[in-house]
Amino acid sequence: MLSWVLIFLVLAIVAAALGFSGLAGAASWMAQVLFLVFLVLLVAALVTGRRMP
């Protein structure tokens, strides 16, 4: 699960970098939302510390 969170966090950062250039306002808003969601998931995964088998 932690690897998926990290992958989507990186994707959100890339989408933000592309969307903040002014070409796509909706993409930048979506990237901000995704970044926050996956940042919260990353913190939750790190706090619980469970490893999947």
Image: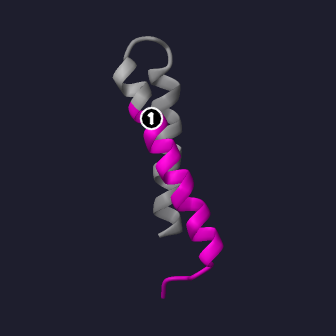
Q: Position of residue 25 (x, y in %)?
A: 39, 18
User: Closer to the camera, 51 or 25?
Assistant: 25
Residue drawn at x 39%, y 12% as measured from the top left: 23
Question: Relative to residue 44, is residue 10 depicted above or below?
Answer: above
Farthest bottom residue in view = 53
Q: Which type of secondary structure does the marked residue at label 1 adopt?
A: helix
Amino acid carrying mark 1 in the image: Ala
Q: Which residues are magenta?
A: 30-53
x, y percentage for residue 30?
Answer: 39, 34
**Circle 1 residue:** 31
Instruction: Tell me where residue 22 appears, x and y as whole percent.
Output: 45, 11
- Residue at 55% x, 56% y: name it: 40
Q: Is residue 45 magenta?
A: yes
Identify the residue at horizontal 44%, vertical 39% (top origin).
33
Left or right side of 47 for 33: left
The vertical placement of 35 against 3, above or below, is above
Q: Could you tell me what secondary structure mostly forms the magenta stretch? A: helix
Q: Is residue 26 magenta?
A: no
Front residue of 1/39: it is 39
| Residue 39: percent from left, percent from top | 56, 52
Is residue 23 left or right of 50 when viewed as pictured? left
Residue at the spot 53% in from the left edge and 67% down from the top edge: 2
- Check the image and report above or below for 21 versus 27: above
